[in-house]
Amino acid sequence: MKPFLPSLLISLAILGGGMTAAGCSSQQDDAARQPLTPIRVNYSTAPESPVKPGTSVKIAVTVQQNGELIKDAQEVEFEIWKESQETHETVKAKQAPSGEYYVERQFPEEGTYYVMYHVTARDVHNMQKKEIKVAK
């Protein structure tokens, strides 16, 4: 049992030293990371829901962080589908000089449609599902 004790102590010292170094590294990494500030996405449609079938609808978002308009979002897409449809269409947004991100879309028939925007800006992602009613 005595020969085993020095080996155990050496092993613990090596492991303990490695853990200390890893612990320091982890603390430095945590200190270097800044908390991410949420982005705020304002969604709108023109005309507002309900819309008539075949009418052109502008689906748009503006993106802000700390009250500042973001004009350099990494990604803005709209996922669009009709209620009870399994297939979804994803459309990349265009950007207006005002900073608004948008798509124009026609809904051919009456029903409930869904739009889920996907916005990634300044390494923060925001997505939310919205509803558009189409009726005569």
Image (cartoon, rainbow, N blue to C red):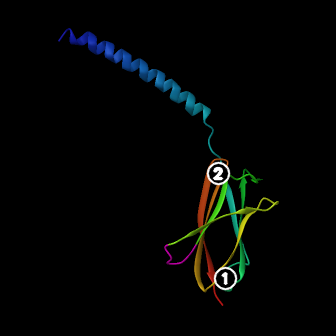
Res 7 quadrant in image: top left
Name the secondary structure under disc 2: loop
Question: Looking at the image, which residue is at 27% across and 15% down?
Answer: 8
In-front residue for pair 54/48:
54
- Any magenta on residue 85? yes
Mark 2, residues whose alpha carbon is within 10 Å: few (<14), some, or many (≥20)? Answer: some
Q: Main secondary structure of the magenta part?
A: loop
Residue 90: x and y, percent? Answer: 60, 66
Numbered circle sitting on residue 50: 1
In-front residue for pair 25/91:
91
Which residue is label 2 attached to?
A: 38
In-front residue for pair 106/30:
106
Q: Amino acid at mark 2?
A: Pro
Q: Residue furthest bottom?
A: 136
User: Looking at the picture, does residue 20 appear above or below residue 91?
Assistant: above
Question: Looking at the image, which residue is at 45% across and 21% down?
Answer: 20
User: Looking at the picture, does residue 113 appear above or below residue 5?
Assistant: below
Residue 121: x and y, percent? Answer: 67, 51
Name the secondary structure under disc 1: loop
Residue 30: x and y, percent? Answer: 56, 33
Which segment is the magenta one? 81-86
Res 17 quadrant in image: top left
Q: Earlier in the sequence, mark 2 or mark 1?
A: 2
Q: Quadrant of the C terminus?
A: bottom right
Numbered circle sitting on residue 15: none
Alpha carbon separation for disc pair 2 and 1: 31 Å
Q: Amino acid at mark 1?
A: Pro
Q: Nearer the viewer, mark 2 or mark 1?
A: 1
